[in-house]
Amino acid sequence: MSQVVTRFAPSPTGYLHIGGARTALFSWAYAKNQGGKMLLRIEDTDRERSTEAAVTALIDGLTWLGLDWEGEPISQFARASRHAEVAHELVKMGHAYYCYCSPEELDQMREEARAAGKPPRYNGFWRDRDPSEAPEGIKPVVRIKAPLSGEIVVHDHVQGDVVFKTENLDDFIILRSDGTPTYMHAVVVDDHDMGVTHIIRGDDHLTNAARQIVIYNAMGWTVPEMAHIPLIHGPDGAKLSKRHGALGVEAYRQMGYLPEAVRNYLARLGWSHGDDEIFSTEQMVEWFSLEALNKGAARFDFVKLENINGHYIREADPRYLYEVMVGTAEEVGRDEDAKGLKANHNTVLAALPELQPRAKTVLELIDLAQFIYALRPITPDAAAAALLTDDSRLVLKSIADTLGGLADWSVPAIDTAMRALAEEKGLKLGKLAQPLRAALTGRTVSPGIFEVMVLIGREESLARLGDQIGG
């Protein structure tokens, strides 16, 4: 059997859409599973929408997701002469023809078809005419000769055998009058020339498959195996929109999701391996098969994505997370956070094992780390401010007096001193810890407050307490 070759063929519209990212993931995983390769083709024939910035955004998105491809990205636009060559070859073979109809004539055909209760389509006027009848000064298009009878069957790994009646196909254009190819034609020529054996794409391309098979058959080329996957829907079952999460993958990076978590989550949107929800990329590649792709539409769920992301944050190496935190802070314009994280590298690293179980996104992780580099006087958030009452400030004064006399600034020593003070005051330890946390971090959630005090040090801890006692 020949080597499996898949392809990801996005149009450069400005970013890598989350649905496109899933298609790329499935194409990549299947190629890896089969010991094959994935190719990247940029379908940039729409020159108005295709820009270098858009191509860069696509490549950056794939790179962030950790999806690689064989060789250099292929530009569809750069292959226009090859597409035209095949179109003219089809004419010579008698499988396509030049059509000289004017726009007005085509409009008239559609109107006549509608009046007769038929679909508005081209009626094959130039299909069997002699080119000598061609009017002067008209640049023709090239149309493929669609079969006049019978069926075209798309053998699909997801949808099963899908049958299209040829009577519903017209002689569609494969080459425009200006010599540029149509999408339908360019895709077939490119996939053939690139040696693509398996096409994995959204099921919105299923009707395209029937037309593309007409071109494959006319050229005598082998039709690649196909898998048309249902599009991703929102939680409400409607087609995925921006309010549901139909964003570019860079938006997920900026929201604080890790690439390994996004890979894991996207894999579960339309593919499954038993009841497994969490799995490594290596496991996904090992288990992946086209037969396990789901026929039903998957629903995007931010809560599930967040939970999976939380798992990967908990399991991550702190050094890796630190780099992601700095990069994310810089990317989203949180310059003070980036500056603070860099200036307190070792302290942040030491704090991360305490912070990781408390965060589901990298942004939450950055928020939790802010106590380390917060500038005095700290402004508490609303929940923390509610704990800093006049009574609690008296408690904080007692805490400051006790801590000021400590010779050993360690978690066990601080713990012992605070327990003794709580007993002396007739309070539960939590009644001391709550206002203490609010005063030192400005929040009601943090790592263990005694660990916080050791992380930021004696001098900073007592200074922050002094700010709040004085307040």
Image (tube, grey):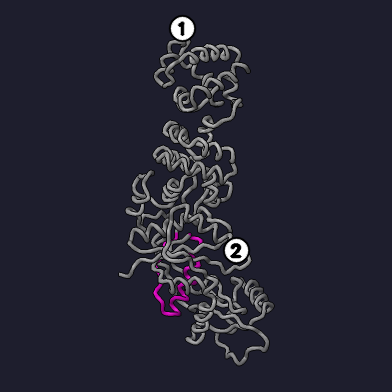
Residue 379 in percent (x, y) is at 61, 26
Residue 397 in percent (x, y) is at 55, 13
Name the residue at 47% across, 68% down. 209
Q: Is residue 421 magenta?
A: no
Q: Is residue 36 above or below residue 288?
A: below
Instruction: For label 1, count other residues whose C-alpha is less than 10 Å away and answer few (under 14), some (14-19) or many (20+).
Output: few
SS for dot 2: loop
Report the number of numbered marks: 2
Indicate the amino acid at tag 1: Glu
Q: Which residues are magenta?
A: 202-228
Residue 142 in percent (x, y) is at 56, 80
Q: Are marks 1 and 2 in contact (CB under 8 Å)?
A: no
SS for dot 1: helix
Q: Is residue 365 above or below residue 143?
A: above
Examine the image and state in which quarter residue 313 appears.
top left
Name the residue at 44% across, 38% down. 310
Q: Is residue 226 magenta?
A: yes
Q: Which residue is mark 2?
A: 51
> What secondary structure is the magenta-colored segment mainly?
helix
Q: Which residue is mark 1?
A: 424
Left or right of residue 220: residue 380: right
Distance from the alpha carbon under mark 1 to that under mark 2 = 71 Å
Which quarter of the rendered picture does the C terminus lie within? top right
Residue 392: mark in rendering: none
Indicate the amino acid at tag 2: Thr
